[in-house]
Image (tube, grey):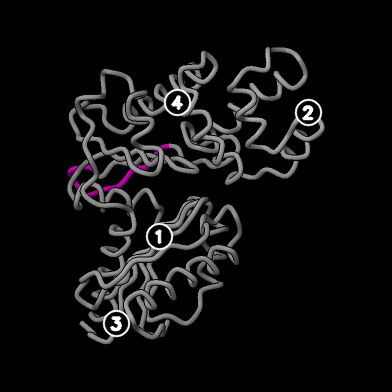
Amino acid sequence: MNTDFFLLGIDGGGTGTRVILGDAEGRVLAQASSGPSGLGLGVERAWESIEAGCAGAFAAAGLTYDRSRCVLGCGLAGTVNRDWLAAFHAAAPQLAGLAVESDAYTTLLGAHGGEPGVIVAIGTGSIAAVLDREGACRIVGGFGFPSGDEASGAWLGVRGIVHAQQAADGRVPVDAFAQALLAHAGATDTEGLIVWLCEANQTAYATLAPVILAHREHPFAARLLAHAGAEIGRMIAALDSSNTMPVALCGGLAEPLRPCVPSAYQHRLRTPLADSAHGGLQLAQREAARIAGK
C-alpha cells in the first residue's frame, strides 16, 4: 500500500458531518466535525462540509491538509438518489481516492464489525439495512424528507409541530408542550409560526425532536413516539425474516428511541461496536487497497 496516503472516514447526514483521519494503515490520528453533508441539502454544501471536516481533522492532528494524498470513504445520506450521487462525484476535488456509499452501509460496517447484522440509523433522517450471511447489503426506508425517513428527527418534528399549530389557533389548549414547541420556533402566534414553517427545512424540523422527547409523557408526544417505535419494528421485520440477527440502533436518536421499540425486538438490540465514520474509514481502507492493487 502507498504509505503516503491518508485515509478519511466520513459520516455525513442532514445535521452534521463527522470525520476520522487515519494513516495508511487505518490507525486513527484525529477526529473532527463540521456542518451537514447529506446530499438532500445540496452537493455544493456537502463538499463544503466534508472539506471543512477534513481540514479540521488534519489541524487536530497537527498536519498540513493535502487533499491529493487523501483517500475518502464517505457514508452519506441521500446516495439512494442516483442523480445526487452522480453530481457529488462530478463535483469532487482532486483526491487520491474516493469511495461513496449510503450512510446505512458504513453504519453497518461500523456497528457489527463487518459481521452479519441489522442496523436502524435514526438521526435527522432514518434508514435501515442488513448485512446478510452472504455479505450482501439490503436497505429499507431512506426515502427522504418529507415523505419518508420514519422515526427520524425530521419525521418527529413534522408531526410534533402539529400540536403547536392546533394550540396556536385554539383547537387544543396551549399547554406546556405547545408552549415549548412555539418557543423553539420563536413564535407567539399563528403568524409567527407560519413564518417558521415556511422557512423550515429537514434540519430545522429535526431540531424539534429534543422538545418532543422532553415531553414524552404528554399524550400527543407519547402517541407519536409509540408510532416511531412501531416504524422501527417494521423496518427490522422487513430486513430479517428469521428474527435472529442482532440489531444495532445507531445515530443521535438511537438511545432516546430505544425504549419505544416494541418488546418483541428488545432482546435483539445491541450496542454498536463503532459508528458510521469508523465504517467510512474501513471503506477508505478498501479503496486504498484497490488503488494500490492496480
- Left-right relation of 276 to 89: left
Q: Position of residue 14 (x, y in %)?
A: 52, 51
Q: Earlier in the sequence, mark 2 or mark 4?
A: 2
Please determine whether, in this image, residue 141 is positioned above or below residue 230.
Answer: below
Residue 131 drawn at (x, y percent) = 25, 45
Instruction: Indicate left or right for 137 with 268 as reference.
Output: right
Judge left or right: residue 33 versus residue 42. left
Q: Which mark is residue 252?
A: none
Q: Does label 1 or label 3 sit earlier along the sequence?
A: 3
Pair 2/4: label in front: 2
Disc 1 to disc 3, how far (Cα)? Answer: 20 Å
The stretch in magenta equals 132-140
Between marks 2 and 4, how big is the CA–CA gap? 28 Å
Q: CA distance from mark 3 to mark 2?
A: 56 Å
Q: Quadrant of the C terminus?
A: bottom left
Nearer to us of marks 4 and 1 is: 1
**SS for callout 2:** loop
Numbered mark located on residue 5 in the image: 3
Q: Residue at x 51, y 55 (%)?
A: 38
Residue at (33% x, 81% y) in the render: 62
Q: Quadrant of the N terminus?
A: bottom left
The kind of residue on which mark 3 rests is: Phe
Residue annotated with mark 2: 189
* Label disc, if present, on residue 18 of the rendered structure: 1
* Mark 4, residue position: 228
Q: Does label 3 or label 2 sit earlier along the sequence?
A: 3
Q: Tell me how far mark 4 sits from mark 1, CA to CA.
A: 25 Å
Q: Secondary structure at mark 1?
A: strand
- Crowding at dot 2, Cα within 10 Å, few <14 / some 14-19 / many 20+, comes out as some
Q: Provide residue 236's location: percent of width, then percent of height.
A: 32, 30
